[in-house]
Structure formats: structure tokens, C-alpha cells
Image (cartoon, grey):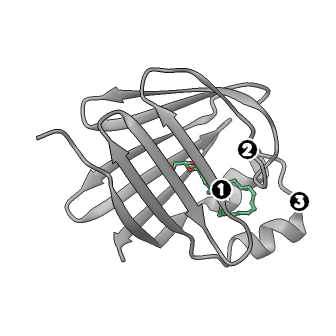
């Protein structure tokens, strides 16, 4: 059975989100609000087609992509920088490389027990998020 990320997931931990946001150049006032948030992710996966909607009381972000097909990402409401993104499978991990102005930008999703993990990378910063099923 291939891995299936589908479901509704609530953030339970968010390690070094501050460092990740600083690396992205997010201003102090926005960071102050953003780090209080407990975002929810709704993921719909149909094979290699993904819909990932990250929602919060402040902002939300929708990403739709197919594994193996590069696309333009606008990061609207996040840092608003455009990049070229490519998501691939590395065994059961979903790995995104976001090529653009920021070096070493990307993320990785995987399942561990009942938890959804997300590692967000930018420059020399790594943010580790864990989600539990709603
Ligand atoms: C959308 C909820 C968070 C809103 C934070 C608002 C302002 C902070 C601005 C930039 C911080 C950068 C990222 C925010 C962290 C999470 C948003 C989605 C991260 C992401 O790219 O998730 C991927 C993988 O699940 C799908 O887009």
C-alpha cells in the first residue's frame, strides 16, 4: 500500500518556526502573530496529485501539485516570493525543492505512527512541525 497523507491534521508542535520566518524575511509584527497560530492542514491525495490547504485564523495557503511536475509557486500570504517548486518521492517521504531567491528552500512531509511530520527549510534554518489527526 502506498502512503496516503489524506486527512485533516492539527498542528501540535512547531520547533524553530521563528528561525524559519526570520530566514524568509518575515517582519517582526507578522512573526509575533504567526507564531501564536495553530494551523490545520487538509490534505487530499489521489495517487500523485495533492491538494494541501493550510488554514489558520490569520491567513491560509493552498497548494496543488502533481509529484514529478515542476510548477510556479507564489507563496502568497507567506513571504510572497515566487519560486519554482518540484515535489518528488524519496521512499515514503514527500520532498519539495523550492528554487528561487532563497537558498536551500524546501520542505519534507512524512508519516510517523499516527502523526504527520513537516520539515520546513530555508537557508540554514529548519522548522519541525508535527500534526495529529483532527
Ligand atoms: C498558512 C498558515 C500560516 C500563516 C503564517 C503567516 C505569516 C507568516 C509568513 C510566512 C511564514 C512561512 C510559512 C508559514 C508556515 C506554514 C505555511 C505552509 C507551509 C508549506 O509550504 O506547507 C506545504 C507543505 O504542507 C504546503 O504548502
Relative to 102, is 130 on the left or the right?
Answer: left
Relative to 4, is 101 on the left or the right?
Answer: right
Which mark lies nearer to you, 2 or 3?
2
Q: Residues within 10 Å of mark 3 (few under 14, many from 20)?
A: few
Residue 115 appears in which quarter of the rendering? bottom left
Q: Residue at x 79, y 27 (%)?
A: 101
Q: Residues within 10 Å of mark 2 (few under 14, many from 20)?
A: some
Instruction: Between residue 36 and residue 22, name the one nearer to us.
Output: 36
Q: Secondary structure at mark 2?
A: loop
Question: Ligand 1 lies in which image quarter?
Answer: bottom right
Q: CA distance from mark 2 to mark 3?
A: 16 Å
Name the residue tied to disc 1: 61
Q: What number of labels is visible? A: 3
Marks 3,1: beta carbons within 8 A: no
Q: Residue at x 72, y 70 (%)?
A: 34
Which mark lies nearer to you, 3 or 1?
1
Image coordinates for residue 102, horizontal then vertical, percent: 75, 31
Name the residue tied to disc 3: 27
Say which quadrant the N terminus sits in. Answer: top left
Q: Secondary structure at mark 3?
A: loop
Who comes first in sequence, dot 1 or dot 2?
1
Marks 1,2: beta carbons within 8 A: yes
Whether ligand 1 has any atom under 8 Å from the Cβ at mark 2 is answered as: yes
Amino acid at each position: 500500500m502506498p502512503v496516503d497523507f489524506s486527512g485533516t491534521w492539527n498542528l501540535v508542535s512547531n520547533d524553530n518556526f521563528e528561525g524559519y520566518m526570520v530566514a524568509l524575511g518575515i517582519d517582526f509584527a507578522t512573526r509575533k502573530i504567526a507564531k501564536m497560530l495553530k494551523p490545520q492542514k487538509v490534505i487530499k491525495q489521489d495517487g500523485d496529485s495533492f491538494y494541501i490547504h493550510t488554514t489558520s485564523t490569520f491567513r491560509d495557503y493552498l497548494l496543488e501539485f502533481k509529484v514529478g511536475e515542476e510548477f510556479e509557486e507564489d507563496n502568497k500570504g507567506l513571504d510572497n516570493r515566487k519560486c519554482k517548486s518540484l515535489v518528488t518521492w524519496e521512499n515514503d517521504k514527500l520532498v519539495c525543492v523550492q528554487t528561487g531567491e532563497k537558498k536551500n528552500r524546501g520542505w519534507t512531509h512524512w508519516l510517523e505512527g499516527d502523526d504527520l511530520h513537516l520539515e520546513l527549510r530555508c537557508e540554514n534554518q529548519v522548522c519541525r512541525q508535527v500534526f495529529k489527526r483532527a
